[in-house]
Structure formats: C-alpha cells, structure tokens
Image (cartoon, rainbow, N blue to C red):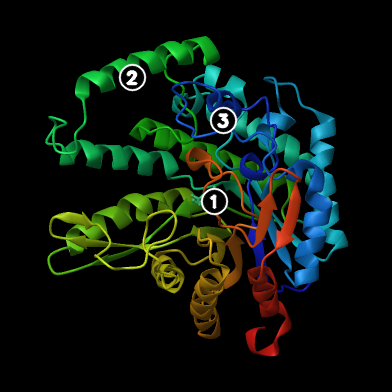
Amino acid sequence: MTEEKFLIGSATAGGQVEGNNTNSDTWAQEYMKTGGYKEPSLDAADHYHTYREDIRMMHEAGLNAYRFSFEWARIEPEKGKFDEKEMNHYLDMVDACREYDIEPVITLLHFVCPKWLITEGGWEADTTPDYFARYVEYVAEHLKGKNIRYIVTINEANMGTLIAGYLEKIMRHTDGAGLQIGMDLEKMAEQQEMTKKENLEVFGVENAAVFTSPRSAHGDEIVCTAHKKAVEVLHRILPETKVGLSLSVRDLQYTEGGKENADKDWEKDFLHYLPTIENDDFFGIQTYTRAIFSAKGEEDPAEGMPVTQMGYEYYPECVEHVIRRVHESFKGDLLITENGIATDDDTVRIRYIETALNGVMKCREEGLPIKGYLYWSFIDNWEWQSGYTMQFGLVSLDRENQIHTPKPSLAFLGSYTKSDRRK
Ligand code: BGC
C-alpha cells in the first residue's frame, strides 16, 4: 500500500448525482403521490456519464480523495441477479480515480436500495442483513487487487432512528392532540391510509421500510447486523482495506440544566453504536452543525444566528468538537466523511471550510487519528426531499445543458493539499 497521505477531497452519493437509478426504491418513491419528494431526480448531475471529467476536475483543483457510492440497485437490480456491466462501471470509476491520483473512498450503501429489497420487507426485515452481505461479497470479490484504503459500509446508519426521534418530538410538542403546530390528526390518518395503499401498489407491501423511513428498535438492530456482516465479509476478502460506517452526529451543547438532555441524544446518536463498531478500523464522522439543549430539550437557533439554506445554524466549529468527542470513546481512525454547507454565497462556503479545516488540523497536530476531510458535496445536487433547491456544491450544475462549473471553493479546498502549512 502506498504511503498514507492526509485525504482532502469531496463526497457525493449515486442517488443524488448519477441520475436514472431506475431500479431503486428512491426512484419509485420519487414518482409516488405519497413519496414525499419535492421533485424527481431525473438526470441529476449526469455523473453516471460525466465521472471521468468530474474526477479530472477534482485533480486539477488539487483534491486527492473522492468519496462516492456504489449503487446496489444497479449492481443487483433483481434479487440474486448481479449485473456485471454495472459493476464494471464502478470499477472504472475507481480506475479513473487512480489515473488522476485521487484516493477512492467507497460507500456501499448511501440510503438508496433496490426496489425489490423493500418488497422483501426492507430495513425492518430479518432477511435484509444477509441480502446486504451477499451484495457486499459480490462487490468485494471485484475489488480484489484494487488496493482500496477505505470502505464505508453504510452511510449514516442512524438516519432512520434520527427521523423516528424527530417525528416523536413533533408529536410530543403537540401534547398528542396535534393542536399546537396546527396538525390535523384526521388528515394525518387519511394520509397514512393513502400511503399504505400506494405502497401496496408500488412495492407490494403496506409499509415501505426504506432506509430513511422512521426506524423501530428492531430495525436499528437489523442495520447494525447488516453492518457487522459486511465488515466480516470485507475483512475476509479485502484484508488490506479499512472498513467502517458513518453516522450523522451533531455537536451537542447545552445551557444550564440541559446536560442530561444533550447526553441522552449523544447516547442515542453515537454511544449506542459503540458495540456495533468496535471491530471497525475507522469511523466516518458526518457533521454539519451544533444543537443546543436546555432543561426543556433542544432549542431552536437563537434569533439572529446565521443559518444555512437547510435552516440549521452556520457552525463549522462542530467538526473539531465532534472529532474530540468521538475520540473519547472510539480509538480507531477517524475520517470526516461529510461536512459542508448549503449556501448560494461561495465566499461563505470558503469561510466555512476554512474554519472546519482549522479545527481538523488542530486535532491532527495534537496527534488525534484524523485521516482526512471530505467536503459535502462535490457538486450541487439532488438533496433528497428538498429536490434541487440546496447548493452544497464546490461545483455548480447547469441542469439544462449539463455543464459543471467549478466555484472558487473547489480550488480553495484543493489548496490544502498543496501548501506546506496545511500538509
Ligand atoms: C447525507 C447526504 C445529504 C447531506 C446534506 C447527509 O445527511 O448523507 O446524502 O445530502 O447530509 O443534507
């Protein structure tokens, strides 16, 4: 294996940039009345075809790493039937990275799954970890000899649990009566019926347990089992590769009386996963902001605080804080697999990256095992439910003509591999 370089790069996910992942659960939901998406992804950034030029653009700007996902729905479009041509597509992406001296960081599951998996019960079914392990085995066999340094098994393994918690919070704020925030419970029940009916038509099951559905405790165990099985397969077939998962973890802070609430969230979001990740080689930190807890619970950002397009607080210091906190209980390597900002002002993005990376470099100088920083995202893309309204990219996207244009922040991020000060 080549000498370890500190990784400075960007990240994407197939579902958000490739376009036309037509055998996936997400694609199906994008066209459902009850699917919850603002607009369909369509061609997205056409990255399925433009990856080589995109990777060259990363290289020219000085980046040395790229995190992207392999899409299960393309590789195994039908249960048990693997598509060699699609597998080769991803191998070619790996080769393109090598050609341009970019370290590929591979994610095996970034939310999107094959549609058939949902028909089989999705992320609430006991059979799913074995299906996942079989897909991972197929991919791993094809990655032999490719010298992959990092593989993320599952992106934000805690996402379904976070969403369940979020919904619960809304219900609690309504005192169960649905009145406080103007919820119409009758309408909600009607909505649920419509969803069941449409799920039945599209997936053949009433409950479409996709990866980002609100998750039960049992579903959470299924995700953890799927990860552990994947780690076992990857360690066996690719012993040189470091394997881990990523979680969405905010910088949890508190005001007087709020410590207990903040600690509860940290337990739920991170500590609770320690037994699952104890044999992992690294952990992927995905952090975007902080949350402040009082004795009453999580507070909204204070009046006048700068917020990003996503509505949460501008707080790049979260990266340094989360690295330190995670390291208290997880001693393996750490990678920032995602951090970024949605803004239409690229100078704000540059400022955000600078503060985030200052924190990362401080931790590195102190000897913390931080191995890289991957900005989310390489290009403006399809931000799930929000459609094309968010601008996270270092590169802008003209969807009409499929033109990808670097913003100044791309070269700014790349400068961190070039200047001695930042090496
Ligand atoms: C996800 C990305 C998403 C990003 C920004 C993360 O939760 O992994 O897919 O686009 O945050 O919201």
Q: Position of residue 130 (x, y in %)?
A: 58, 29
Disc 2 target residue: 191
Q: Is residue 109 above or below residue 81?
A: below
Task: Give the alpha-carbon distance from disc 2 to disc 3, as whole Å.
Answer: 19 Å
Residue 26's disc number: 3
- Circle 3: residue type: Thr
- Circle 2: residue type: Gln
Q: Earlier in the sequence, mark 2 or mark 3?
A: 3
Residue 162's disc number: none
Compare residues 275 and 373 and report the one nearer the observer: 373
Task: Give the alpha-carbon distance from disc 1 to disc 3, as whole Å.
Answer: 21 Å
Q: Is residue 137 above or below residue 243?
A: above
Disc 1 target residue: 245
- Circle 1: residue type: Leu
Circle 1 Cα neighbour tier, 10 Å, few/some/many (<14 / 14–19 / ≥20): many
State the quadrant of the N terminus. bottom right
Compare residues 298 and 276 and report the one nearer the observer: 298
Q: Is residue 231 visible?
A: yes
Circle 3 Cα neighbour tier, 10 Å, few/some/many (<14 / 14–19 / ≥20): many
Q: Earlier in the sequence, mark 1 or mark 3?
A: 3
Kindly state the secondary structure of the residue where label 3 is placed: helix
| Nearer to us: label 1 or label 3 | 3
| Nearer to us: label 2 or label 1 | 2
Q: Earlier in the sequence, mark 2 or mark 1?
A: 2
Question: Among all residues in the image, which is located at the extreme front?
Answer: 400
